[in-house]
Amino acid sequence: QVQLVESGGGLVQAGGSLRLSCTASGIIFSINAVGWYRQAPGKQRELVALITNSGRTNYPDSVRGRFTISRDNAKNTVYLQMNSLKPEDTAVYYCNVVSRIGVPNNDYWGQGTQVTVSS
């Protein structure tokens, strides 16, 4: 059984930083692409960072230069370092494995971790 557990969220002032962690059991992260997603109230879930099994990364313009995704294969964990946070980054953040066609696995969504950025 695959389980993804996100942690590290919290309340931070604008301009601050947080590091999120996503630890997996039942699946080997190192052979998969992994993405960090977020969902704000009333909005659709969106991808904010992706790391492939070869270590390539990709970000949307909204977070590029502020967010950094990384992985520790020995710990089967993927991280999201978030700097220069803005109030519009407020959302629940989730991680998931991503297929070769860019689709997350709907059976693997965890509880997520809340990030709240105050102005």
Image: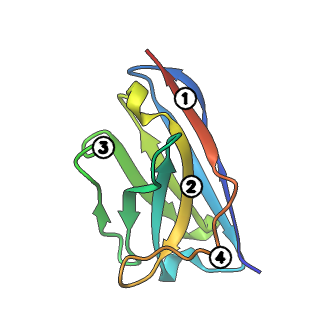
Cα gap from disc 1 to disc 3, whole angstroms: 16 Å
Q: Give the secondary structure at mark 4.
A: loop
**Residue closer to the observer: 81 or 41:** 41
Which residue: 50% across, 42% down? Answer: 42
User: At label 1, which amino acid type do we have?
Assistant: Thr
What residue sits right under mark 2 in the picture?
94
What residue sits right under mark 4 in the picture?
107
Quadrant into which the C terminus falls = top left
Q: Is the residue marked by circle 3 packed among few (<14), some (14-19), or many (20+) residues within 10 Å?
A: some
User: At label 2, which amino acid type do we have?
Assistant: Tyr
Question: Do the residues under discs 2 and 4 have CB atoms within 8 angstroms?
Answer: no
Q: Is the residue marked by circle 1 packed among few (<14), some (14-19), or many (20+) residues within 10 Å?
A: many
**Residue closer to the observer: 101 or 82:** 101
Question: Do the residues under discs 2 and 3 have CB atoms within 8 angstroms?
Answer: no
Question: Do the residues under discs 2 and 1 have CB atoms within 8 angstroms?
Answer: no
Residue situated furthest right in the rendering: 1
Q: Is the residue marked by circle 2 packed among few (<14), some (14-19), or many (20+) residues within 10 Å?
A: many
**Is 27 situated above or below 73?**
below
Cα gap from disc 2 to disc 3, whole angstroms: 15 Å
Which residue: 77% across, 81% down? Answer: 1
What residue sits right under mark 3 in the picture?
63
Residue 70 is situated, as x and y percent measured from the top left of the image, at: 43, 58
Residue 98 is situated, as x and y percent measured from the top left of the image, at: 46, 75
User: At label 3, which amino acid type do we have?
Assistant: Val
- The image quarter in which residue 69 lies: bottom left
**Is 15 situated above or below 10?**
above
